[in-house]
Amino acid sequence: MTTLDPASVPRTADLDNPLYYLENMETVVRWVLDHHGDLLTATECCRLETFLELETAQKALLTRLVMRSGELFRADKLVYPELGSPVPEILPRLVSGDWLDADPLLDLDELFRLFTLPELRPAFADALQSLGHGRTVPKATMKAVLSEYLSGQRPMAEWFDAGDARVIRLQHMPLFERVRLMFFGNLRQSWSDFVLVELGYQNYEQVPLTAESRAFSRREEVDCYLAMQACRDQLDQGGLASEVWPQVPEPVDNAWLASRRDRLLLELGRQAERQGDRDLALTAWAGSQHREARLKQLRLLERMKRFEEAWQIASHWHTEELSDAERQGLDRILKRLAPKVGEPKPAPAVTQPINEWQVSLPRPVAGSVEWAAAEHLNQPEAPVAYVENTLINGLFGLLCWPVIFKPVPGAFFHPFHTGPADLTREDFVARRRSDFEACFVMLGDGRYQQRILDTWHDKQGVANPFVIWPALSEALIELALACIPAEHLEAMFRRLLLNVKEHRSGFPDLIQFHPQRHEDKPRYEMVEVKGPGDRLQDHQRRWLDFFAREGIPASVCYVRWDDDAGVGSSE
């Protein structure tokens, strides 16, 4: 295992190269060998080294097959002109190298996936006729009829004479899946997410990757992930939750894997409830720390009339720090449970009045209602910017850049991340809390402004999940820093961190600055714009309520079209 030297960042392929996908595949394999070789067996390392030593055409064909779905292929259907050699000439060499099985065993389902109805009809015409069926039955009917009499696996030749239509099976796919997991850090992303893209189209933060920052420190942890993925696959295919439950790995001390286990238990509980196994659903949710599991557990207990148990859990949870959506859901449950258990109803949450106003504007020739409102409000002494979710998120991303890209275990797997892999997980903040607090200290002592501007200059164009570069000019940042008080920024940043996934959206569309106002008056206002028939969404209401509680100037502008005023600007 080596530490990533910025000078050694793997080179990504140019899409002008017809074999660019092979170059990217070689990057993946070399990266895993260099950085995770200790998590592979000697046999697996040898097999991957052998792959890298193959002739170019062989490697390219193998890569094409690995990228495709499944492991079985019709050799006569493989056409890749960029290989430089005919596929029939390459296949025997891959078979002799144990990369392909030239005579795999096939079951009836696999046979029917590989061959067309015109190819299958003559092969099974006599069998269908002997069973009392015509020769022209549909493919699905043919398979259903034959499946009652033809079971098990057999070589292609024992099914029927397919002439030149050979079937091959890709070998060592589990190894390639293990490589994919160790490179991406998940099995959600397919090979095409890396192999078939030109990664050089954007710049990536160069995060130092060390043995200490890896998500997997032992091979057993990779095996644990694969076991959890197998459980998830069974659930996705409609398997019984009661049969999957015994296969779920025991709790682990790896925080990153524990988070994935929490999500697996969340989904297993959902499946169990749908299948009528309520006790298992409760058990699964009780064992999950996922933020959605607790509410689901409480709602199910309530439906099962286990009110006392639900009240005890809800009352204890009520004391914890929650996001607005969690707090809202919990308050509703407590309100319903209180009379059932003889407790006084909790005081209703007090929502702040929203500052709303209306304006009539000429209907624009083109452009959105937000742009029309921005044009109407904009003044030389009070400029307006259409920022939506980009400004506050962007300022946060620039201030907290080193924390976002801190190489904590399970956050970064390769040099091509646009942000940490654990960004929306429950423990994203907890594992970096002291670092975030250090950033907030800068808001208190005034250093934040220079930090944000320096980062904007130093990191220009580098991918960051909070920073949309085209939306953030230096002039806009300087104006925002001059007009938005540090305490307002801190309040918004802290709310953002309560639930990054939920709170990154919902910010008002516009911001109007008043740089010439005296500092004892608000020098900015955020404005949510709603056109005719549009209404506030829940996450927008929660932000507006938060703004009102924190004294952050914000309002809602309802636009109505004044058709009698003629047509306005198209800008």
Image (cartoon, rainbow, N blue to C red):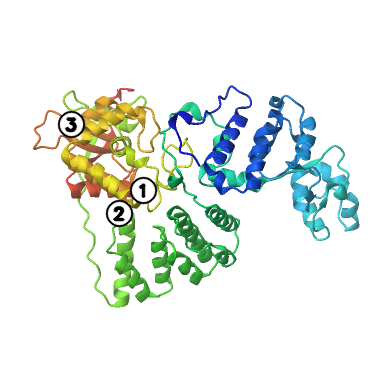
Q: What's the amino acid at mark 2?
A: Asp
Which residue is depicted at the point 78% across and 53% down? 107
Q: Which mark is residue 324?
A: 2
Residue of label 3: 482
Q: Earlier in the sequence, mark 2 or mark 1?
A: 2
Please, is residue 66 above or below residue 364 in the view?
Answer: below
Residue type at the position of mark 1: Glu
Label 2 packing within 10 angstroms: few (<14), some (14-19), many (20+): some
Helix, strand or loop for disc 3 = helix
Please indicate, yes or no, whether residue 19 appears anywhere in the rendered image. Answer: yes
Q: Residue 570's x, y, as percent?
A: 34, 22
In this rendering, the answer to whether 316 lies above or below 561 is: below
Instruction: Quadrant for residue 330, please give it.
Output: bottom left
Q: Is residue 129 above or below residue 486?
A: below
User: Of the residues tagged 3 and 1, which is closer to the observer?
Assistant: 3
Residue 545, image x, y percentages: 24, 49
Residue beneath disc 1:
502
Which residue type does callout 3 highlight?
Ala
Q: Are marks 2 and 1 in contact (CB under 8 Å)?
A: yes
Image point (63%, 24%), residue name: 18
Q: Earlier in the sequence, mark 3 or mark 1?
A: 3
The reply, left or right, for residue 451 in relation to residue 274 is left
The answer to whether residue 521 is above or below residue 470 is below
